Image (cartoon, helix red, strand yellow):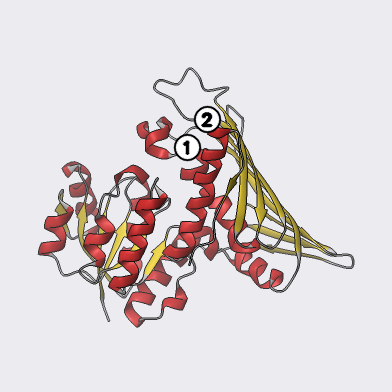
């Protein structure tokens, strides 16, 4: 089956998806939509298809099997509902939105529509992450520690907390998602955040430093630090500690330290490509199991990061209530 693909939001992350759609022998790019006619037209000039500035027009005019949703977190509107209502399968970039109530409503609509969903948590598709997932199966975890530090993204809306949700929600969400993917769900979040070294950035309203404590449903204790601070480099790491082992993910490398041996695995594949290929194959074959980051799981990642924002604002821990 040839999968007819549309894409909405032709900004930075869209270019990554477009090249993989191009390369896939079961995918055909049919249309690209962006509020900027120039961006949409540039995308189709490089990759083919028809350019649109109105998602409703695109969905009405084109026969799509799959839609890549690559809009900023504040700009989702009812894109997912419009597509799912037409039976179009979805890959939604992270984060899913900025309001859990709205995202839950979307999830209910998508579930009733019966379409397959993937989300942009591409790090799950890394070979070292899959190896870590297999290794941790059945093991008791005591502590989960992570950090991510980098520079300020060159995107005007990103420094507006109301539009991005802040670094933890919009960027470090990848690192939080790995913590949850490997160590399980979380029920308690407490956080401190501050704007310290970037106060001179025009229009900035979001913290540039954050420290978050997590309590997992398993009883494990977690912690993550994140910041976009003036630094000579960018770095991230995740460490999981249990009885007689310490597992560390740094970049695309996995190290597992045990009393009698050390295992090292370095990832080689393009995890963005692996993610997109898996989604397209899932649509072509109907095999949902190929998708490693479904919408329902991405919701919990969003819920944890939004809870951290709430805790930082109130100064109190936030309890996440189990649902369903």
Q: Which residue is mark 2?
A: 207
Say which element carries label 1.
loop
Q: Which residue is mark 1?
A: 166
Q: Residues within 10 Å of mark 2 (few under 14, many from 20)?
A: many
List x then y, in percent, for residue 127: 59, 67
| Residue at (69, 73) in percent of width and height | 137
Residue nearest the viewer, comparing 310 with 114 = 310
| Residue 127 in the figure: left or right of residue 166 | right
Up/down of 158 relative to 297, above or below:
above
**Residue furthest out toward the right:** 260
Cβ–Cβ under 8 Å for marks 2 and 1: yes
Q: Residues within 10 Å of mark 1 (few under 14, many from 20)?
A: many
* On-image quarter of the N terminus: bottom left
List x then y, in percent, for residue 252: 61, 56
Sequence order check, earlier mark of 2 and 1 = 1
The reply to whether residue 202 is visible in this rendering is yes
| Residue at (50, 61) in percent of width and height | 271
Query: Cα distance, mark 2 to mark 1?
Result: 7 Å
């Amino acid at each position: 089956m040839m999968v007819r693909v549309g894409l909405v939001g032709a900004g930075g992350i869209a270019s990554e998806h477009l090249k993989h759609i191009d390369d896939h022998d079961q995918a055909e790019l049919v249309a690209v939509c962006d509020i900027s006619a120039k961006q949409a037209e540039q995308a189709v000039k490089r990759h083919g298809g028809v350019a649109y500035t109105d998602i409703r027009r695109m969905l009405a005019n084109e026969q799509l099997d799959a839609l890549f949703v690559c809009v900023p977190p504040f700009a989702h509107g009812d894109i997912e509902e419009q597509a799912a209502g037409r039976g179009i399968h979805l890959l939604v970039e992270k984060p899913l939105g900025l309001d859990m109530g709205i995202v839950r409503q979307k999830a209910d609509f998508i579930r009733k529509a019966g379409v397959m969903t993937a989300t942009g948590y591409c790090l799950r598709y890394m070979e070292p992450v899959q190896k870590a997932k297999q290794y941790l199966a059945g093991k008791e975890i005591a502590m989960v520690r992570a950090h991510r530090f980098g520079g300020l993204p060159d995107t005007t809306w990103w420094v507006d907390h109301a539009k991005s949700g802040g670094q933890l929600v919009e960027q470090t969400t990848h690192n939080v998602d790995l913590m949850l993917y490997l160590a399980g769900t979380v029920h308690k979040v407490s956080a401190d955040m501050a704007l310290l070294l970037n106060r001179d950035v025009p229009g900035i309203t979001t913290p540039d430093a954050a420290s978050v404590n997590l309590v997992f449903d398993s009883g494990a204790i977690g912690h993550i630090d994140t910041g976009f601070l003036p630094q000579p480099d960018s770095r991230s790491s995740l460490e999981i500690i249990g009885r007689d082992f310490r597992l560390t993910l740094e970049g695309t490398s996995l190290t597992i330290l045990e009393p009698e041996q050390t295992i090292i695995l370095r990832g080689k594949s393009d995890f963005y490509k692996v993610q997109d290929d898996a989604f397209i194959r899932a649509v072509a074959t109907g095999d949902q199991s190929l998708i490693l980051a479904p919408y329902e799981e991405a919701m919990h990642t969003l819920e944890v990061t939004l809870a951290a924002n709430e805790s930082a604002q109130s100064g109190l821990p936030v309890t996440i209530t189990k649902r369903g």
